[in-house]
Amino acid sequence: MSAVEPRRRRSARLAAGDLLPVQVRRLLVHELRAAASLGRWVARRKHGVRPGDHAAGYTSPQTALLYVLLCVSVIETIALAFLIPWPAVHLAMLVLDVYGVLQVLGLQAACVTRPHVVGADGSLRIRYGALFDLTVPADAIASARVDRRYPLGRLLTLSDDGVLDLIVAGQTAVTLELNHPVVFTRPLGSTGEARTIRFHADDPRALVGALYPRPAQKAV
């Protein structure tokens, strides 16, 4: 391969970056990660969980809803196969329905394979599938407690006083107080600063316990 070829590839990547808005590029990355998560889901592999880490799932509140959406999409696909007489239209609708099914499965797979992670060093990685990923260093964590709330709003909401809610199916279960603000990135690329983070965990007590392990008792 000539030395010109790598330069051409780099130029092509830079040109694509200039042509595509950052929001579009991030959405494409999210979709690729969700697609890769389908393979991890089948293989039962977790992303970013090392030996000694504590993985905490957060999908329980949304699982039933996502599977209902999946069933509705499948039923719709079957119904349209009988109702639409035009092959071209039917094919287009089939492609869209299959894409929708893969989107739902990819979202669930990404959430299952990308859990929250309490690191062996005391850090906390808070995630939501391929859409949100924030690592809070151990020295930034002031306290963590089980705190069940049912806020209204989208997946991510940031209040004026710096409270970030990462909402799963209308609920959060852990409140994390910080020693200093941390910067986070929203799914489409904009950033914000959080002083308090509220997020969901299926077993919030286990997550908090992993952040504050009890000292080993001496044998008598």
Image (cartoon, grey):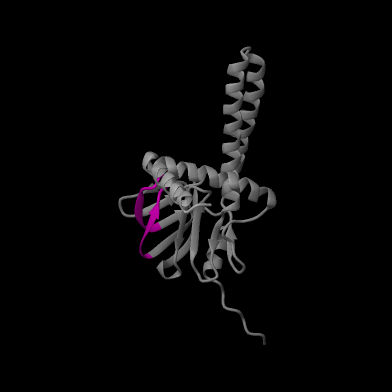
Q: Residue at the location (60% across, 69% down)?
A: 52
Task: Residue 153 in the image: state x and y as whole percent.
Answer: 42, 42
User: Is residue 13 positioned above or below 214 on the image?
Assistant: above
- Kindly give the residue lying farthest to the left in the view shown: 160
Query: Within the image, what quadrant is residue 90 found in?
Result: top right
Residue 181 belongs to magenta span: yes
By secondary structure, the bulk of the magenta-drawn segment is best described as strand
Q: Residue at the location (36% across, 42% down)?
A: 18
Range covered by the magenta-colored residues: 179-196
Query: Within the image, what quadrant is residue 15 found in?
Result: top left
User: Is residue 5 positioned above or below 75 on the image?
Assistant: below
- Kindly give the residue lying farthest to the bottom in the view shown: 220
Image label count: 0
Q: Residue at the location (59% across, 61% down)?
A: 49
Q: Is residue 177 visible?
A: yes
For the C terminus, give its image quadrant. Answer: bottom right
Task: Residue 7 in the image: state x and y as whole percent.
Answer: 43, 51
Seen from the viewer's position, the closer of residues 19 and 216 is 19
Judged left or right of residue 119, residue 23 is left
Q: Is residue 152 visible?
A: no
Task: Residue 13 in the image: state x and y as whole percent.
Answer: 43, 46
Residue 49 belongs to magenta span: no
User: Is residue 74 positioned above or below 139 on the image?
Assistant: above
Task: Residue 23 in the image: state x and y as whole percent.
Answer: 40, 42
